[in-house]
Image: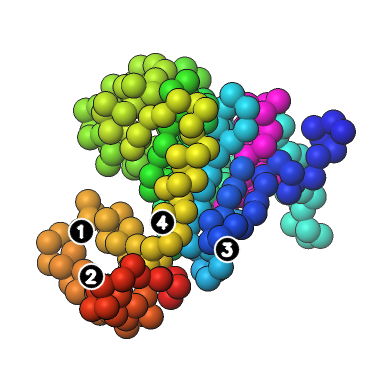
């Protein structure tokens, strides 16, 4: 079966096992570059798992030598035919002001936002090259386990364009503004050792141990108090954009919400009974 004949659910594979939603980008012949349909499918999956009680954590990875090399620039889709009466008037340009910005908002920004806002922790098993939007997709995840042979590349400067897919928002929040400028201005490959040293990823392991380690992290999170982790993620993501008063108010509100969950009751009971907790996720 040729690449063009493969169904979307084979290019972006999804399965749930013991509370872990495993999402795999499976287009190794193209460096796991995302077509518009693949990108939108990923965004939809993250939006769905965010509110699905059967899912308690997400494990995102790729197949082959790449995690994701960004957008598939070769496979651009032809624009849909306009609705009757919406045909462009005579002399209208092929693209007008606002079209490009709208495409970015509805495309890669939607995907990255879906990962950042997911109400479940997201573990990235960074198996290979993550470039362009693919690098920002990885960095949007909550925890990153990186294979020794993998690398991150802010490739945009090499193409004469600026970083998109939320990169200028995400990267400085991880490594600081000065380091982010260095990485984005030069566009050099960032290997696993450097990525771990500057805090881009959580840990680096041999490629042969990547799947096992990332799965262990995901399974451990899936056994945790899902709502407490979700609100912890929300508070941490907001922390760099909030003033102290707002942060403290939101913390008190979130704590009130969490103390009403079944998992909080179980946590207290297990402490009193001196046994391991058995969290349900709600």
N-terminal-most mark, 2 or 3: 3
Magenta stretch: includes residue 103? no
Please tell me which residue is depicted at 42% across the width and 48% down the height of the picture: 217
- Labels 1 and 4 touching (C-beta < 8 A): no
Image location of residue 56, percent across then percent down:
48, 62
Local secondary structure at mark 3: helix
Image location of residue 244, percent across then percent down:
12, 61
Please tell me which residue is depicted at 59% across the width and 48% down the height of the picture: 23
Task: State the mark number for residue 250.
Answer: 2
Is 76 above or below relative to 97?
above
N-terminal-most mark, 1 or 4: 4
Camera-nearest residue between 175 and 206: 206
N-terminal-most mark, 1 or 3: 3
Cα separation, mark 2 vs mark 3, equals: 25 Å
Cα separation, mark 1 vs mark 3, equals: 27 Å
Cα separation, mark 1 vs mark 4, equals: 26 Å
N-terminal-most mark, 1 or 2: 1
Point out the stretch of residues depicted in magenta: 25-44
């Amino acid at each position: 079966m040729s690449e063009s004949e493969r169904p979307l659910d084979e290019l972006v594979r999804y399965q749930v096992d013991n509370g872990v939603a495993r999402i795999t980008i499976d287009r190794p012949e193209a460096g796991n570059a995302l077509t518009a349909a693949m990108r939108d499918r990923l965004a939809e999956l993250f939006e769905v798992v965010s509110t699905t009680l059967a899912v308690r954590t997400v494990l995102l990875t790729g197949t082959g030598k790449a995690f994701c090399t960004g957008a598939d620039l070769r496979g651009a889709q032809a624009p849909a035919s306009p609705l009757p009466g919406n045909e462009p008037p005579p002399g209208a340009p092929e693209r007008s002001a606002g079209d490009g910005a709208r495409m970015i908002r509805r495309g890669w920004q939607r995907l990255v936002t879906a990962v950042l806002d997911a109400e479940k922790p997201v573990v990235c098993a960074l198996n290979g090259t993550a470039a362009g939007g693919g690098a920002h997709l990885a960095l949007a995840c909550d925890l990153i386990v990186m294979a020794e042979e993998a690398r991150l590349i802010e490739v945009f400067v090499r193409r004469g364009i600026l970083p998109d897919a939320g990169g200028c928002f995400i990267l400085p929040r991880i490594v600081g503004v000065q380091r982010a400028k260095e990485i984005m201005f030069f566009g050099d490959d960032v290997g696993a050792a450097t990525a771990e040293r500057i805090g881009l990823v959580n840990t680096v392991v041999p490629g042969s141990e990547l799947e096992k380690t990332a799965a262990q992290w995901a399974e451990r999170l899936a056994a945790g108090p899902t709502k407490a982790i979700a609100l912890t993620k929300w508070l941490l993501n907001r922390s760099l954009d909030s003033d102290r008063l707002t942060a403290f108010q939101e913390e008190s509100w979130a704590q009130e919400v969490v103390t009403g969950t079944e998992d909080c009751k179980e946590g207290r009971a297990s402490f009193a009974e001196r046994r391991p907790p058995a969290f349900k996720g709600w």
